[in-house]
Image (cartoon, grey):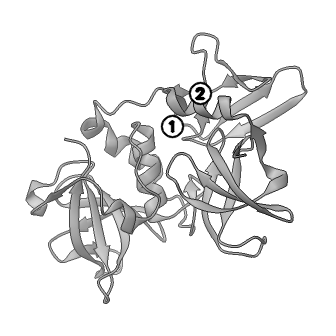
Amino acid sequence: MTRYGICNLSLIPLRAEPFHKSEMTSQLLFGECFEILDQKEQWSFIKVAYDNYEGWVDTKQIKNISSEYYEKVSKETQCITDLSSHAILMKLGHDEMLHLLPGSTLPTMVEEEDLFQIEANEYMFLGLSRTPDASNLKKEIEEVSRFYINAPYLWGGRTLYGIDCSGFSQMIYKHFGIKIPRDAYQQATQGKTIDSLNEAHPGDLAFFDNEDGKITHVGIMINDSEIIHASSHVRVDKIDDQGIFNSEDQQYTHKLRTIKRLVS
């Protein structure tokens, strides 16, 4: 029988192999659900519902949920924590508090009362929440993206306190209710190809490849000459037909491959 789980901690590392020293390939944020595909000793191999990403998590860090609850939250429009470095959950009936990160999922939110449930557990949310909406993406995406300015680069990271390039683009798009894959090369398969930089709109994704032609980097276009991306930290750089130009180092750092538009 298929089993399901949910992240009921602020953050859970997703690893390539079933041990703590293994490479962290991604992270689960509070409220994200998954299917449990396999177990090995204290580890569970999972597939994340949000992006179908697979990896290993410490079984002691996850909470099992019923298939009925999994199906319910998978079909509903869910609130997320908005742009704030400080949001709190109170677990009602317990003397427990949990700090949440921007972009965490708040299942089945009762918006007027800021209450929601995960199975039998009831929570009260204290902070800013948002129902994702892509209608104003072009106008809002620069402000949303700049919230993460100076967040340090972290391989596999998806948060304000450590994030990689594709985690950054995925989390920004999550803010607008648009699901995109986890890795840059997967994201590059989405959307419509834009022929030239001067046709780029705010929110378009720019992809960059290495000497072997493999896509290794992604950033978000602010306009047709500036890009925000995670490289050492989240930063804004100039971009032209050759690629990203780092004004601090006075050199090109990434070679432009293609630009994709995911929202018309």
- For this orientation, the residue located farthest to the front is 1
Density class for disc 2 (Cα within 10 Å; few <14, some 14-19, many ≥20) is few
Residue beneath the point at 28% across and 30% down: 135
In the rendering, which numbered label is found on residue 12?
none
Estimate the x, y position of residue 209 in percent, counting from the top left. Answer: 31, 78
Given residues 132 and 6, the one toward you in this image is: 6
Tell me if residue 246 can be seen.
Answer: no
Given residues 75 and 174, the one toward you in this image is: 75
Estimate the x, y position of residue 198 in percent, counting from the top left. Answer: 9, 58
Dot 2: element: helix
How many marks overall?
Answer: 2
Estimate the x, y position of residue 32 in percent, counting from the top left. Answer: 62, 42
Q: Is residue 164 left or right of residue 42?
A: left
Examine the rendered structure and indicate whether residue 63 appears above or below residue 257.
Answer: above
Examine the rendered structure and indicate whether residue 118 appears above or below residue 29.
Answer: above
- For this orientation, the residue located farthest to the bottom is 211
Reading the image, the residue beneath label 1 is 83
Density class for disc 1 (Cα within 10 Å; few <14, some 14-19, many ≥20) is many
Residue beneath the point at 33% across and 42% down: 141
Indicate which label's residue lies in the foreground, 1 or 2.
Answer: 2
Q: Is residue 95 left or right of residue 149?
A: right
Q: Is residue 41 left or right of residue 117?
A: right
Image quadrant assignment for residue 113: top right
Estimate the x, y position of residue 71 in percent, counting from the top left. Answer: 59, 32
In the rendering, which numbered label is found on residue 72?
2
Image quadrant assignment for residue 240: bottom left
